Image (cartoon, rainbow, N blue to C red):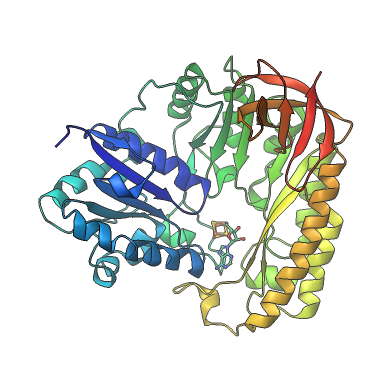
Amino acid sequence: MSATKKLFIKTYGCQMNVYDSERMAEAMGGQGYVTTDSPDDADMILLNTCHIREKAAEKVYSELGRYKGLKAEKPDLKIGVAGCVAQAEGAEIMRRQPLVDLVVGPQSYHRLPELEARARAGEKALDTDFPAEDKFDHLAARPKAKRGPSAFLTVQEGCDKFCAFCVVPYTRGAEVSRPADRILAEARDLVERGVREITLLGQNVNAYHGHERGLAGLIRDLAGIDGLARIRFTTSHPNDMDDDLIAAHGDCDKLMPYLHLPVQSGSDRILKRMNRQHTRDQYFAIIDRLRAVRPDLHLSGDFIVGFPEETETDFADTMELIERVGYGSAFSFKYSTRPGTPAAERDQVPEDIKDDRLQRLQALITRQQRAVQDAMVGREVAVLFEKPGRMAGQMVGKSEHLHAVHVTAEGLAPGDLRRVRIVGSGPNSLSGVLI
Ligand code: 5AD
Ligand code: SF4
């Protein structure tokens, strides 16, 4: 047997899981594991899961079922479930799918090497604690390998808001912020390794309180790092958009003009039932203030259709809110009943009505998104190039507004930040020429 073992990680759900998967891969690097792109040659398979909607959670079990043959061929193969399904269902996962050797919740990743050793010794290993220590401190330091130009950095986890539909406060726990000095050190290290854009992550990132001046203070300190060109953050709650964070959108050049600010519904009646703690007018007021300091800000959002008791009038309010805001992009979902959350007990909207509303809402969003994208044609933008495109000589990067931009030119490399004139707008991306 070779000395290095292979780890296959499959990541579901949000960007925080993407970041966690990277960190888990690094922690397992200390145990002699290298990552592989295929489950077929893996010594360990880890599914980093999402529990936000029923469909996401069920995917995990169908994926696990597929590994039956592999496990029969290779009895030494260890299979683990990490992430929010692990937290929500714990030992139940092993009962429902006995192939699983190891279950680890999102706050216990630093214990993964120890859990893996226990699984190797033949135990069923489980850890879904919420330990007091910071898991990131205990994870192995990132090796000094070169990185792509864009990176995620988790600064905050958990949520204290308890929206009536959402499992996050239960799966990820209470709001916790990482200390600013650790984040700044991690950011400097990323920049030394080639990163030029950092997206700060948190379930409620703008509730960050690990810096005495909150998220805006952290962003301003990060902006002082030479070589770091762009800062983004996601995902935010309207009630945590404080004065300084709004001001930063106007006066911090490195903070990109794109903001994901979910509102979920445009109906005050539904917002109240969702326990969102704000009205539609308060949401409009925040957007007006943001646009006053940064007129070209592109907004993005999340919407839930068919929340319990949502009427056609409530839905019309959501459509009207979308018309009024004009989103650069948005994510929309049919309400999914989550066990243990308050809304699960209420009168549900029939599935066919949810389907119909989702279709209408998505058609509107697609129209807006396309109009915002088409309006970029003829404009000059800055593009941070990330990787080669599908055509020879083509490179793909992101504009300040997070549009994918394709450019065909000689000598472009990942990490280049160049001025580009936009010449075309396709279904999901722009094309441009170097200036
Ligand atoms: N059903 C549908 N969508 C949900 N979201 C969260 N919980 C649910 C649910 N039970 C959506 C919200 C949130 C996004 C991450 O997922 O829109 O902002
Ligand atoms: Fe869930 Fe609401 Fe917290 Fe967002 S703010 S994670 S939707 S409870």
Coordinates of residue 197 in the picture (x, y in percent): 59, 28
Instruction: State the residue at coordinates (44%, 54%).
Output: 174
Image quadrant in which you'd find residue 138: top left
Q: In the displayed structure, does residue 83 sit left or right of residue 191?
A: left
Q: Is residue 298 visible?
A: yes
Coordinates of residue 267 in the picture (x, y in percent): 76, 69
- In this rendering, the answer to whether 288 lies above or below 312 is above
Task: Work out which quarter of the rendered image holds the N terminus and state it.
Answer: top left
- In this rendering, the answer to whether 69 lies above or below 417 is below
Task: Work out which quarter of the rendered image holds the C terminus and state it.
Answer: top right
Image quadrant in which you'd find residue 340: bottom left
Instruction: State the residue at coordinates (37%, 27%).
Output: 142
Instruction: State the residue at coordinates (24%, 45%).
Output: 43
Coordinates of residue 169 in the picture (x, y in percent): 47, 59
Instruction: State the residue at coordinates (77%, 61%).
Output: 280
- In this rendering, the answer to whether 427 lies above or below 366 is above
- Residue placed most toward the observer, 381 or 225: 381
Q: In the displayed structure, does residue 19 sit left or right of residue 278?
A: left
Image quadrant in which you'd find residue 297: top right
> In which of the image's four quarters is ligand 1 placed?
bottom right
Please state the total of marks drawn on the protein image: 0
- Residue placed most toward the observer, 281 or 3: 3
Q: Is residue 131 visible?
A: no
Q: In the displayed structure, does residue 301 sit left or right of residue 198?
A: right
